[in-house]
Amino acid sequence: MSKPVTVIDYGIGNLYSVTRALEVCGASVHLTENHERIENAERVVLPGVGAFADGMKGLARRAQADPIRRFIESGRPFLGICVGMQVLLEVGEEFGEHAGLGIFPGRVTPVPATGDDGKPHRIPHIGWNVLVPPTSRPNWDHSILAGLPADPAVYFVHSFAPEPAINDHRLADCYYDGRQICASVRAGNAYGCQFHPEKSGPIGLRILENFLRL
């Protein structure tokens, strides 16, 4: 039986690829801007591409911010992807400081401009990178990353990344030329992925399937 998923349209999401990936995983996808439908959904995905400030403006124009907060407070499954994850934090630093939804204490900061050898590297961070558990979390049991094979590689396109203030909120990291970057966050049933599961092949589909099982 298909699992209903509400995908939020706030004028900034890569809606088609996210919707298609969820459908491949067996979801029945409902795309909406309506704040009442968001608040009453069974599970919600907030996609996103672009800048933090534009994401928050899109949510504000459609009166979606408070319904998202109330939905997450209810404990139902929520997944933010890329910018849709970044806006869950308190502050984003892209093009100045901008307030986020404040679900996760912390900030969204620039990806370091150099590797740990001090040499400049490409920004944005684009391409495949391997997820690793952070030091605060020995494994991914009972999360949307459960059951992944060793050294799971996923696809990134970003110039900014989350820095959670609470270590227990870090679900996964990756390393870019030796620089540690937070790749995923979690608090209860609220998840965020800096990478794009919908563009990450079988690994990404497995993550979305795990989300549908929550």
Image (tube, grey):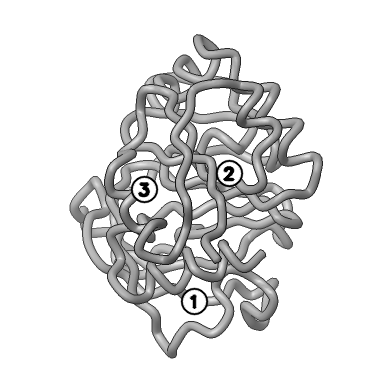
Label whose residue precedes the other's in the sequence (2 or 3): 3
> Are the residues flagged by discs 3 and 1 in contact, CB closer than 8 Å?
no
Q: How far apart are marks 1 and 2 (CA)?
A: 25 Å
Q: Nearer the viewer, residue 203 or 135?
A: 203
| Residue type marked 1 | Val
Query: For residue 34, what is the image quadrant?
Result: top right
Eye-nearest disc, 3 or 1 = 3
Quadrant location of the C terminus in the rendered image:
bottom right
Query: For residue 142, what is the image quadrant?
Result: bottom right
Residue farthest along the front direction in this orientation: 1
Q: What residue do we see at 63% from left, 61% from top?
A: 170
How would you rate the neighbour count of disc 1 (Cα within 10 Å): few for under 14, some for 14-19, many for 20 or more?
Answer: many
Q: Is mark 1 on a helix, strand or loop?
A: loop
Q: Name the residue under label 3.
A: 19
Rendering coords of residue 151 (x, y %) = 40, 85
| Mark number displayed over residue 132 | 1
Q: What residue do we see at 61% from left, 54% from top?
A: 191
Rendering coords of residue 197 (x, y %) = 38, 60
| Mark number displayed over residue 83 | none
